[in-house]
Image (cartoon, rainbow, N blue to C red):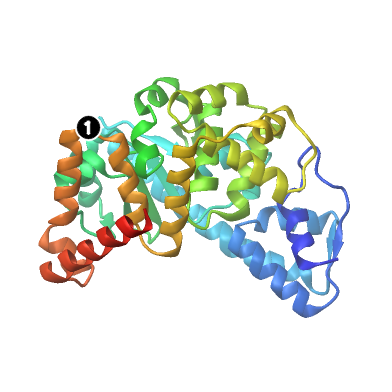
């Protein structure tokens, strides 16, 4: 059996419709390559469970998996502590927040949280709370990783502000659940209205996205998240097959905000890579007629992964009003001095880069 098959076994462990065929890694080199892939995809929990049940075997596999699992669990605990502390201080100042992605999905959708590992905590706040939230977190010792283009620009157009918590863990404070054009077409107010009670962590009540929105976000992360890998695809399958969220509501949400192509692509990718049997959602996804404009936006995201943020960012223009287009481009063309220094650029080199990228976009178009 190949290493690739062993990774698929780990990624699909415990899913209805997944193959029951196990895998044996024959050599130490195979085991090491498998461990490396498992770490890359964040599948240590599933891999350890598959190894314990003897669905996966190999020389020294169990001991090596335990080592990487312990390290991943420590990272999870640090990220959860950063999230709990952020909830405490933000709530104290009347700022509402929702827990996103791994920290929420691990507790709401998996049989045990250690089966869904994550290295950082993600939370969503309302853009109107942006300035106060930054001040509160800074006073608590959370340090943002990079300065904003401009404070007003970030509040109006930004997606995520990454912080390092006092304990060294990463906390990503989201203003939107996706970037580029999709971040502006998604109705975030409806997401807030649908938000559920969530789960309890360290004695605190954590609010999270409703089930269909968690599936929607997992699909967005699968297709639009750089290097999201098999972990986000496993989330898509977990929400559909084990949590059995209302996927048809997810489709309705996606269609209403021009993201149905993203959801269909995520489900197709998940079913293909995890080798799952047909499900009504996969039948819908394979029969979906992708929208040309949405496909072009997805391609821009993929180009962003290989180069830089610019292709994704420029897709935002199609979703903005004429005035917002002007403000958006003005902020990018004339960023703050602090932002330029952080990126190692001068005003002149930055403007030259913009001209070069613009010409490139024109000729590619």
Residue 51 in percent (x, y) is at 80, 59
Residue 107 in percent (x, y) is at 58, 38
Q: Where is mark 1, residue-wise?
A: 321
Q: What element does badge 1 sit on?
A: loop
Q: Residue 9 appears in which quarter of the rendering?
A: bottom right
Count the marks: how many? 1
Residue 358 as seen in the image, left or right of residue 239: left
Q: Is residue 355 above or below residue 129?
A: below
Residue 247 in percent (x, y) is at 61, 26
Q: Residue 73 appears in which quarter of the rendering?
A: bottom right
Q: In this view, does 107 lie above or below 306?
A: above
Q: Which residue is rendered at x = 84% and y = 47% of the image?
A: 19
| Residue 160 seen from this side | no
Residue 313 as seen in the image, left or right of residue 277: left
Pick the residue in front: 189 or 60: 189
Residue 364 in percent (x, y) is at 37, 58
| Residue 297 seen from this side | yes
Q: Which residue is rendered at x = 11% and y = 63% of the image?
A: 337
Pick the residue in front: 37 or 263: 263
Q: Is residue 116 above or below residue 239?
A: below
Pick the residue in front: 68 or 74: 68
Q: Residue 306 appears in which quarter of the rendering?
A: bottom left
Q: Which residue is rendered at x = 63% and y = 34% of the image?
A: 239
Q: Which residue is rendered at x = 14% and y = 49% of the image?
A: 330
């Amino acid at each position: 059996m190949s290493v690739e098959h062993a990774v698929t076994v780990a990624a699909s462990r415990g899913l209805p419709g997944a193959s029951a065929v196990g895998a044996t890694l024959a050599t130490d080199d195979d085991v090491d390559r498998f461990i490396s892939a498992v770490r890359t995809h964040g599948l240590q929990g599933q891999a350890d469970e598959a190894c314990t049940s003897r669905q996966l075997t190999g020389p020294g596999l169990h001991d090596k998996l335990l080592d990487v699992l312990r390290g991943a669990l420590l990272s999870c605990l640090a990220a959860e502590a950063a999230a709990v502390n952020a909830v405490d201080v933000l709530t104290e100042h009347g700022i509402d927040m929702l827990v996103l992605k791994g920290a929420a999905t691990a507790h709401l959708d998996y049989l045990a949280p250690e089966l869904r590992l994550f290295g950082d905590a993600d939370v969503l706040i309302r853009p109107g709370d942006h300035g106060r939230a930054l001040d509160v977190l800074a006073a608590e010792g959370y340090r943002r990783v990079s300065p904003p283009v401009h404070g007003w620009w970030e509040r109006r157009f930004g997606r995520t502000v990454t912080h390092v918590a006092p304990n060294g863990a990463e906390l990503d404070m989201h203003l939107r659940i996706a970037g580029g054009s999709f971040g502006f077409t998604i109705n975030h107010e409806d997401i807030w209205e649908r938000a559920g009670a969530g789960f309890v962590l360290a004695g605190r009540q954590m609010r999270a996205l409703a089930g269909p929105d968690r599936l929607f976000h997992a699909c967005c992360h699968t297709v639009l998240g750089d290097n999201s890998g098999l972990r986000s695809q496993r989330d898509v399958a977990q929400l559909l097959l084990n949590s059995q969220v209302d996927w048809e509501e997810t489709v309705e949400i996606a269609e209403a905000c021009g993201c149905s192509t993203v959801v269909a692509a995520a489900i197709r990718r998940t079913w293909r890579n995890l080798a799952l049997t047909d499900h009504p959602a996969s039948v819908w996804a394979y029969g979906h007629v992708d929208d040309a404009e949405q496909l072009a936006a997805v391609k821009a995201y993929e180009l962003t992964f290989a180069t830089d943020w610019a292709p994704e960012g420029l897709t935002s223009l199609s979703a903005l009003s004429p005035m917002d287009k002007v403000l958006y481009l003005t902020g990018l063309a004339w960023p703050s001095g602090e932002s330029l220094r952080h990126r190692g650029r001068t005003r002149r080199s930055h403007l030259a880069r913009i001209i070069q990228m613009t010409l490139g976009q024109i000729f590619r178009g």
